[in-house]
Amino acid sequence: QVQLVESGGGSVQPGGSLRLSCAASGFTFGIYVMSWYRQAPGKERELVATINTGGYTNYADSAKGRFTISRDNAKNTVYLQMNSLKLEDTAVYYCNSVHNVFATFNYWGQGTQVTVSS
């Protein structure tokens, strides 16, 4: 059974930091591209950051310089370190995995809430 379980969300003041984790199980983690998405109230889900099977990373412009995505294949876990958080980073953050060849194998976590407020 495929599972992606996010954790690490919470409430933080502007300028603060959070580290999200996504623990994967039920599939061969190392051959999946892992991403973080987010969805704010009333907005569409958007891509935040991606890390491929070789460790190459890509970020949305809004995340560049503040967020860092990483993966630990030994622990089947992907992380999102978020620094210098802004009010507009408030959203539900979702973990996503896509097979590096067969994109139909595409899984989502249940999401974790991140709230940035003063």
Image: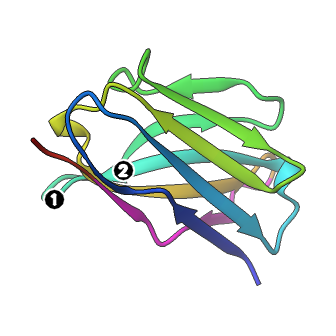
Residue type at mark 1 is Pro
Q: Secondary structure at mark 2?
A: strand
Q: Is residue 101 magenta?
A: no
In this orientation, which residue lies closer to the viewer: 20 or 63?
A: 20
Any part of residue 46 in sight: yes
Residue located at (57% from left, 25% from top): 58
State whether residue 48 is above or below residue 24: above
Residue located at (80% from left, 44% from top): 72
Q: Residues within 10 Å of mark 1 (few under 14, many from 20)?
A: few
Left or right position of 3 against 73 = left
Q: Which mark is residue 41?
A: 1
Disc 2 designates what residue? 38
Residue type at mark 2 is Arg
Q: Residue furthest bottom?
A: 1
Q: Residues within 10 Å of mark 2 (few under 14, many from 20)?
A: many
Residue located at (85% from left, 47% from top): 73
Q: Position of residue 56 (x, y in %)?
A: 72, 24
Q: Residue furthest top?
A: 65
The answer to which quarter of the image holds residue 93 is: bottom left
The reply to whether callout 2 and callout 1 are in contact (CB within 8 Å) is no
